[in-house]
Amino acid sequence: MTKQSTPNDQLSALADHLAGQRNAILSEWRRVVDIDPEVTTASTITRTQFVDHIPAVLDAFDHRLRATDFDERVQSVTEQRVSAAEHGLHRWQQGYNLTETMREWGHLHLCLLQELERYAAAQPQLLPTVMPVAMRALVRLCSDGVSASATRYAMLQQTDAAGRVRDLEAALLQLRTLEKERAQVWREAAHDLRGSAHVISNVSAALALSKEAMTLSRQNSFSELLRRGVVSLNQLLADLMDQARLEAGQEQRLVVEFDAASMLKEFCESMRAVAAERDLFLKAEGAASFLVEGDPVKIRRIVQNLVLNALKATERGGIKVTWEEGGSERRPQWMLCVQDTGPGFKLQSASPLEKVLKQATDEAQAVEERAESEGRRFTRTHPHTQPAPTLASQSAREVHHLPSGDGIGLSIVKRLCELLDASLELETARGEGTTFRVIFPRKYA
């Protein structure tokens, strides 16, 4: 670098230096995050998952340093915000809470600041305007990263709430249907009462007469409708209580070593009769013994919600629950999959949370495809053990014997994943069923 260099030349030289040091910066970032006791989720994911969209953020920072006019600067700021928002989405999917994400951003910005300071100390011939421009660009990077990620988390919370609103609306509709049915029964009873000559003198006898006047099948139909309504609403209230406890931070993880294979096989065995009532299979496949660390009660709640949702979505074929190890020696992981042969993802009928999970999964896989392969990866298997039926063979009948509330059930799964430092993925296609993957750490610090 010569003394005759212009500010733009020197900023471009700084950008070249940062590009050359990128791997070192990202490695130092990972190191300081790993030793931060407030960021536990980072220790459970691979380098590719950890880096995520940050290279795109740094590319935008590079473009900002090299920008020579206003339009280029505006474009670089837009790129930073978009990449930061996508990074926030995937941190949410990977099980981070907002505090962990903000602390990660803070560590990244300190790593970049330290590199800028080292560069300035090694380049005494820098023009006095160069480093202030670079520092202002770094402040903008910090501001955009934090605000875009926080905004993304706020939008995801709204998406989560929208799914619960939809389930509550469905429950209210069910109540209104129940009320209409009950009103119809009593109208029929009232008609019978009016036809009785003894209604005025003996109301109790008239009520008994009205009951006798109802056909047995009508009484049974009304009783079954009432039973279904009570079961569904009880389940909905239980789900809402679970969701409230998770959001209030009243749930704590209790990490112990346990045999995940034994627990999952026992759970599937207990649910096989429910699947058989719908002429569906429920398979459990994986290692015969599979020791992991984790909270077995909460992992069972996760698989229970996913299997119940899969049973409701599937008309023919069935559900397969699988488990396998993965990750790397430094960061051992294991993966739980719940695969169904249902109709697959239909945008117009999917819950808001399902839509954003699919978007996050698609984006994460695109990042992995672009990144260098590193260590052992999970094999992305086809989501079925056998071909899914065509959509034409899928009837639209309502499933009454299973609890309602896909949105709330999936929301509980997502909250439990955050509590367990686990990531949640959704892979689906119309007519090809759906696969939910939960990637857990196999060991906890």
Image (cartoon, rainbow, N blue to C red):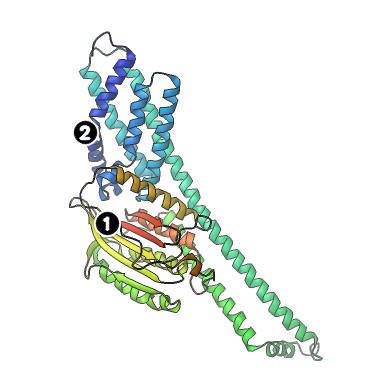
Left or right of 247: which side holds 107? left
Q: Position of residue 309 (x, y in %)?
A: 44, 65
At horizontal 29% and vertical 27% (from top left) the residue drawn is: 113
Q: Which residue is mark 1?
A: 379
Q: Is 197 displayed left or right of 208 in the figure?
A: right
Q: How many marks?
A: 2
Residue pushed farthest top? 4
Mark 1 crowdedness (10 Å alpha carbons): few <14, some 14-19, many ≥20: few
The span from disc 2 to disc 1 (Cα, nearest Å) is 29 Å
Foreground of the two, 113 or 37: 113
Query: Horizontal and vertical percent for residue 335?
Result: 29, 59
- Which corner quadrant of the image does residue 76 belong to? top left
* Residue 37 visible, this angle: no
Q: Residues within 10 Å of mark 2 (few under 14, many from 20)?
A: some
**Where does label 2 land, which residue?**
24
Image quadrant of residue 103? top left
| Residue 165 seen | yes
Picture residue at 33% right of the left edge, 58% below the top? 438
Looking at the image, residue 258 sits to the left or right of residue 204; the answer is left
Q: Which residue occupies 41% across, 65% down?
A: 305
Considering depth in this image, is 97 or 202 the residue closer to the camera? 97
Vertical relation: 46 (above or below) 143: below
Instruction: Give coordinates of residue 218: x percent, y percent.
Output: 64, 84
Q: State the residue in front, 398 or 120.
A: 398
Which kind of residue does numbered mark 1 sit on?
Thr
- The outermost residue toward the left is 329
